[in-house]
Image (cartoon, rainbow, N blue to C red):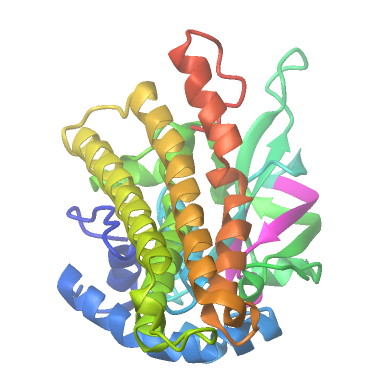
Amino acid sequence: MTGPGARLTLGRTTTTDLMAATLAPSRPDFPELLRRARALVPALRERAQQAEADRRVPAQAIAELVAALGRGCGSTAWIHGVTAERARLLAKFGGEAQEDVWGTHPGALITSSITPDGMANSVSGGYRVTGVWHFVSGIDIADWGVFGTLAPPPSPADPPTAIYVLVPRGDCEIIDTWHVAGLAATGSRDVRLNDVFVPTHRVVSMLDLKEGGGPGVAVNPAPLFRLPLIAVNPYAILAPVLGIAEGALEQTLAGARSRRLVTTGNAASEQQSVQLRIAEAASEIEAARALIINDCRDAMAAVEADRTVAVELRLRIRRNQGYATRLLTSAVDHLLAVAGGRGIYLDHPIQRAFRDVHAAGAHLGLSWDLVGTMWGQHALGLKVTTPAY
């Protein structure tokens, strides 16, 4: 579905060239994508408060969504990241499954919940799947969903087999559980599948995709599709966190230049505490960006050279995803302090950034407790007890 030159780019966007290649007859280059993204930011900021109240991304934002940066609206960026990454996930399914989705609707949006929270029973021609999945971001605006589930093992002595199943949204029962403090507009509701039939061609092995394989590699040979799935897909939600922090810094700088302190009447920008907090936040954001870009380059260099992305690199990537999230969360915390009492008002952007980055940090894909422990176990020669890499 994409050309052989496709690659994962995490400058100020996520895997947008994949989506752009699908939606447009000719693929814009990265500077053009970045220009479009920056043009969207003011409108996204204007809609952010209403989007949060509605608990879903506005239809107008979806229609404009080439690359949504967290600088404008963290939830919109989150949905873009998820749907763009899930397009890459679908590209690792077989050609027939890709044709089901993109054959009649090249701009189809795909969401997912990839934890194995269901059970698939073998039947003639496929599986019948039942289960409830949580945190299905963007299910309201998605056309298809990919869900992790367990299938019967090859023999009774073996454990269940973990698979991904692809289903149209029409087969999904949406359960409105999404009443939350952060990333409210992502609409990450629960989904129930009740004895839904899934044909064999819409099923892939979790293990194959984890290791960088999958039947779609024969159809989409670009290096992008040979990246190990679990190690790199958290970038789809980490990139919005980076954007949220960068946007918070931009808006804090603008506010501090014009705001005067109630107690003295002096400009806030003249206060040393303000200067130091902004400097620390900027340093943390730049450090997080450097970690992200360095690891992305190393992963892409491996697959472009037809090498396997080694376990050591995959674990380092996961560790640094968690640590970058900590840095970005700390940066926003510093910026909230700069805003003073005004920052707690619901129409102030910093309080939304604060809630959104803390909500993102609670995601298992970005959890420092999880990924830091994984790396530490491996570094100390112990068995990695959570194979989320």
Q: Is residue 7 left or right of residue 230?
A: left
Q: Is residue 66 visible?
A: no
Q: Residue at (20%, 31%) from the top-left corner?
A: 306
**Residue nearest the observer in this picture, 153 or 64:** 64
Res. 163 image quadrant:
top right
Q: Nearer the viewer, residue 143 or 29?
A: 29
Q: Nearer the viewer, residue 210 or 168?
A: 210
- The number of callouts visible is 0
Image spot of residue 223 (x, y percent):
25, 44
Magenta span: predominant SS is strand
Question: Which is more toward the observer, 377 or 62?
Answer: 377
Residue 346 against residue 278 in the figure, above or below: below
Residue 61 vertical position relative to residue 219 in the rendered view, above or below: below
Is residue 306 within the magenta segment?
A: no
Q: Measuring 31% from the left and 43% from the top, which residue is drawn there?
A: 291
What x and y, as percent, mark residue 253?
35, 77
Q: Is residue 359 left or right of residue 293?
A: right
At horizontal 28% and vertical 66% (from top left) the residue drawn is 17
Is residue 2 positioned above or below 22 on the image?
above
Q: Residue furthest front?
A: 264
Left or right, 271 with reference to 342:
left
Q: Please report the bounds of the magenta region as a residue range.
A: 127-146
At x 60%, y 34%, the residue is 369
| Viewer can see residue 268 | yes
Residue 317 in percent (x, y) is at 38, 36
Pick out the residue farthest to the top: 381
Quadrant in which the N terminus is drawn: bottom left
Point out residue 169 in the picture as x, y percentages from the top left corner: 66, 69
